Amino acid sequence: MTDSPVVQAPLDPKEQPILDQILTIRDELSLLKQDKSTYIKSRDVLEIYDRLIEERLLDHLKEAAFFSPKDLESVSQALDSMQETLKRGSESHSPQLLKLLENRLDTCRNILGELKLSLSDLSLELTPTYERLVSILRSISAANTRQKFPIGDVQGFQNQLHEIQATMVDGHFLAEDSTTPAGQQVATDLLNRCLLWSDIVLSRQGKIDERFKSTYDKLCEIRNQLEKLSITQVWSLRETDLYNYQRQLDRIDESRINGNFEDSAGNKADLHAQRTLLYLIRRSYAYIYTLINSSEPVSEALLPIFNQLQTLRRCLHEVKRSGGVSSPRELYPYSMKLNSIDSMRVDGKFMVGSEIPEGQGSVNSLLAECFDLSYELRVEAED
């Protein structure tokens, strides 16, 4: 294929396992293509594609070094759903394909385990504060990439950070009973990171270094197109569209040198350009991941819930596009409906009797997205 990059030997020995994994995937796909005795359905290849995106998303979460327990819970549920899919297909699919997918799952679970370990010291008392900080940081990054820089919004986010900081006593977050809960370091580090990022974003006001403007424009275009796809009807989506977007992202992501974006003269991007470009890449990969899950077949038993969540997502997006809400109370009907749907789950799964219907990944991903949208709107309204 003309758009496939040339395989080069990794400069960093640590990159060798990553190259080996990618080459294994390529070899397995080539084997499946050449095996004329086995009929390979498009869904089989999409299973591999799904895990590649899942692993990329996990790698970027690890690199970003900020994520909430809810993020990890959503990914964990998706991996569990994939494991169930593998079990159901064990008698009807190629052993080579199944082995490849099992390896992908193992890799993803290992990365997920590392991410969970990094938050293992975070206490239940500090989790709400930590999750709010994650949401604020993402909101600032999103505002930083808007076509017209919303200085008032970013100042509002910064004020929220100062309010959180003002609750600290002698440099510590306190629980309601005035004790010092575990997880101080991880929460304090994130708060400091948020404060620094808000200062940088306000100073730049959406203007990226001209050396990286073309890359920035390209990533904004990809992000915007994926965002439009995410709020259109699922059946209007073609998997080839996602693959094309993913390949464009891969080429930009793989152009980094030791994790850094560099200009034509080999000079590294400043912190603002580096974080801005990485945010756009991660946001786009997240959209692809969500769209892949949305294209998963949903059983008839789950369709009513799935359709309700699609409607809620469209409504929340419309509220966000129209400027948000003036009071958190306006979100009450949405929160009530989301909590009602969430309470239907048993151990994170939607059950029908003792059966686990197909489409768990799609419905859970859609539910998580709706909760995130609702939370972002509430945070903005509390400003």
Image (tube, rainbow, N blue to C red):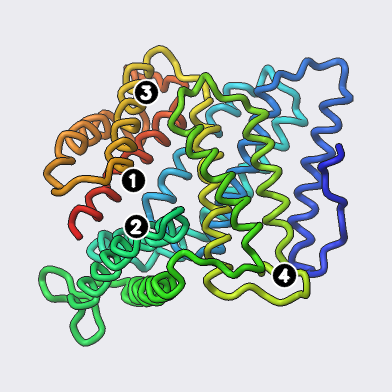
Q: Nearer the viewer, mark 4 or mark 3?
A: 4
Q: Of callouts 2 and 4, which one flags the residue occurring earlier in the amino acid sequence?
A: 2
Q: Residue at x 26, y 65 (%)?
A: 156
Q: Work out how far the residue at label 3 is from the one at label 1, CA to CA, in angstroms.
A: 17 Å
Q: How many marks?
A: 4
- What residue did someone put label 3 on? 306
Taking the image as drawn, is residue 285 in sight?
no
Secondary structure beneath label 3: helix
Q: Of callouts 3 and 1, which one flags the residue occurring earlier in the amino acid sequence?
A: 3
Quarter in which the C terminus is drawn: bottom left
Q: Nearer the viewer, residue 261 or 318?
A: 318
| Quadrant hosting residue 209 | bottom right
Residue 135, labelled with which disc?
Answer: 2
Q: Work out how far the residue at label 1 is from the one at label 4, CA to CA, in angstroms.
A: 35 Å
Quarter in which the N terminus is drawn: top right
Q: Of callouts 2 and 1, which one flags the residue occurring earlier in the amino acid sequence?
A: 2
Q: Residue at x 60, y 57 (%)?
A: 216
Q: Work out how far the residue at label 4 is from the one at label 3, CA to CA, in angstroms.
A: 45 Å
- What residue did someone put label 4 on? 263
Q: Work out how far the residue at label 3 is from the one at label 2, CA to CA, in angstroms.
A: 25 Å
In percent of width and height, residue 30 lies at 85, 32
Query: In the figure, is residue 187 to the left or right of 267?
Result: left
Q: Work out how far the residue at label 2 is from the one at label 1, CA to CA, in angstroms.
A: 8 Å
